[in-house]
Amino acid sequence: MNPVRLIAYSDYLCPWCYNAAVRLQRIEDEFGAQVYIEWRSYLLRPRPEPGRSLEKFRAYTESWLRPAADADAGTFRVWQTDEGPPSHSIPPHLVAKAAAAISSAAFRRVHDRLLHVYFAENRDITRDDNLRAIWRDCGLPDADFARRDDPAILQAVLADHNEATELGVNGVPAVRMADTDTAIVGAHPLEMYRRWVAKRLNE
């Protein structure tokens, strides 16, 4: 039997995407080879936005307490460092795509680390030094970090985002079955994802 393939559109600056990532990782762990999840880029902040102050950004992160209160949530901390605010969505997506070009395992390590570093450690994942540190923390070769500067990587990120918008996705996280054009938007409970996958496997 072919595995159920899920396409998940996500942004590394989105707290609800963190919760979806935690839950979908549990789905992968539970169903094993019966499920394959492909993460694709969605850009909530496609370009730098000048004028965002650290003070206002800190106040915004108080809103993270809401997703933090969910069951099966990621690890959140209201912003306590002097880094940030993050510039825009593209830098972490470039690094994630560069890791994916190495292997799916490399992508998974970088994907998980980006979310934890931002939401739990309060480090700006749009800063080059932090992105390099994440790359090294994940045990990836220093020389391969340059992959993120390949124009083809940027085009892949933009293509993911454009695909999502063409499908009518206007928010993230959004998940769809690979053989359908309809995405379910929102960080849904673990049980909903579990039932969704189980139903497809039983068809």
Image: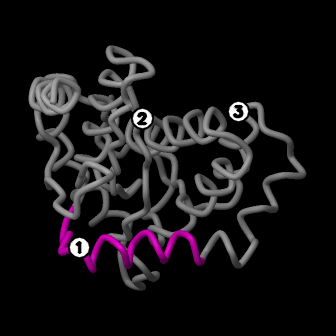
CB atoms of marks 2 and 1 within 8 Å: no
Based on the displayed image, in which of its 4 quarters is residue 52 positioned?
A: bottom left
Front label number (2 vs 3): 2
Name the dominant secondary structure of the magenta segment.
helix
Q: Which residue is the extreme one toward the top?
A: 30
Is 84 situated above or below 188?
below
Looking at the rendered structure, the kind of residue marked 3 is Asp
In which quadrant of the rendered view does residue 69 lie? top left
Quadrant holding the N terminus: top left
Residue at (47, 61) in percent of width and height:
84
Query: SS class of the residue under badge 2?
Result: strand
Identity of the amino acid at label 1? Answer: Leu
Query: x, y percentage for residue 26?
Result: 32, 21
How far is disc 2 from disc 1 in space, using C-alphas? Answer: 21 Å
Q: Position of residue 72 (x, y in %)?
A: 21, 23
Relative height, residue 120 to residue 30 (above, below): below
Please tell me whether residue 46 belongs to the stretch shown in magenta.
Answer: no
Return the residue nearer the eye: 197 or 56.
197
The label shown at residue 33 is none
140 vs 154, left or right, is right
Q: What stretch is highlighted in magenta?
A: 155-171
186 is higher (above) or lower (below) than 88? above
In the picture, residue 75 is in which quadrant? top left
Q: Which of marks 1 and 3 is nearer the N terminus?
A: 3
Q: Which residue position is annotated with label 3?
A: 137
Q: Which residue is drawn at 44% across and 69% down?
A: 160
Residue assigned mark 1: 167
Q: Residues within 10 Å of mark 1 (few under 14, many from 20)?
A: few
* Residue under numbered circle 2: 36
Looking at the image, is mark 1 or mark 3 nearer the viewer?
1
For disc 3, the neighbor class at 10 Å (few under 14, some 14 to 19, many from 20) is: few
Find numbered disc 3 in the image and state the secondary structure of the residue it sits on: helix
